Image (cartoon, helix red, strand yellow):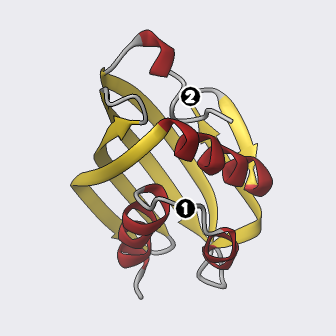
């Protein structure tokens, strides 16, 4: 699986999946993983907690990639995540993300900015909620 395919897999199966597959997350992400999102920083355990929190609020999600570029160990993505919340309402978030892969092919860093396109102000933290 190339790096862009890894990113597609993560958004399709981990972000868009109905359950948190911690083993798969730990297979794809480095032990020292760092995620910087909207001024907050998560480590690998924080990212897993973030995925668990999202699954409590999000019933289903799908990602539309507007741009996905790979350069060496870096993948840059401009994408929109559209989701149906557990209460039936909808949200949409645009994400600009830079993913850095380590020498083992695992994601070591994600530096992202999110922008709520659709939904209430209570969902402004959806990119980093734990």
On the image, the x and y values in percent for residue 41 come to 71, 38
On the image, the x and y values in percent for residue 59 come to 41, 45
Residue 19: image tag: 1
Residue 38: image tag: 2
Taking the image as shown, residue 81 lies to the left or right of residue 53, namely left
Q: Determine the residue located farthest toward the bottom in the rendered image.
A: 1
Where disc 1 sits, the SS reads loop
| Residue 60 vertical position relative to residue 22 in the rendered view, above or below | above
Q: Residue at x 72, y 43 (%)?
A: 42
On the image, the x and y values in percent for residue 44 come to 75, 57
Image quadrant occupied by the N terminus: bottom left
On the image, the x and y values in percent for residue 38 come to 56, 28
**Nearer the observer, 38 or 69:** 38
**Nearer the observer, 119 or 31:** 119
What is the crowding at mark 1: few (fewer than 14 residues within 10 Å), some, or many (at least 20)? Answer: few
| Residue 119 vertical position relative to residue 80 in the rendered view, above or below | above
What is the crowding at mark 2: few (fewer than 14 residues within 10 Å), some, or many (at least 20)? Answer: some
Q: Residue at x 71, y 47 (%)?
A: 49
Q: Determine the residue located farthest toward the front in the rendered image.
A: 87
Label 1 close to label 2 by CB (< 8 Å):
no
Q: Nearer the viewer, mark 1 or mark 2?
A: 1
**Nearer the observer, 64 or 90:** 90
Q: Residue at x 43, y 32 (%)?
A: 114
Q: Residue at x 40, y 28 (%)?
A: 87
- Report the Cα–Cα distance between label 1 and label 2: 25 Å
| Residue 115 vertical position relative to residue 27 in the rendered view, above or below | above
Image quadrant occupied by the C terminus: top right
């Amino acid at each position: 699986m190339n790096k862009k395919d890894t990113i597609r897999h993560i958004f399709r199966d981990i972000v868009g999946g109905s359950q948190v597959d911690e083993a798969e997350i730990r297979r794809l992400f480095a032990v020292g993983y760092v995620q910087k999102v909207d001024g907050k920083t998560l480590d690998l355990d924080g990212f897993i907690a973030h995925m668990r929190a999202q699954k409590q609020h999000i019933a289903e999600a799908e990602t539309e990639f507007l741009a996905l570029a790979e350069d060496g160990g870096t993948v840059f993505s401009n994408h929109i995540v559209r989701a149906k919340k557990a209460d039936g309402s909808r949200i949409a978030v645009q994400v600009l993300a830079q993913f850095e892969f380590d020498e083992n092919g695992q994601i070591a860093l994600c530096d992202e900015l999110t922008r709520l396109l659709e939904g209430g102000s209570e969902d402004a933290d959806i990119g980093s909620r734990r």
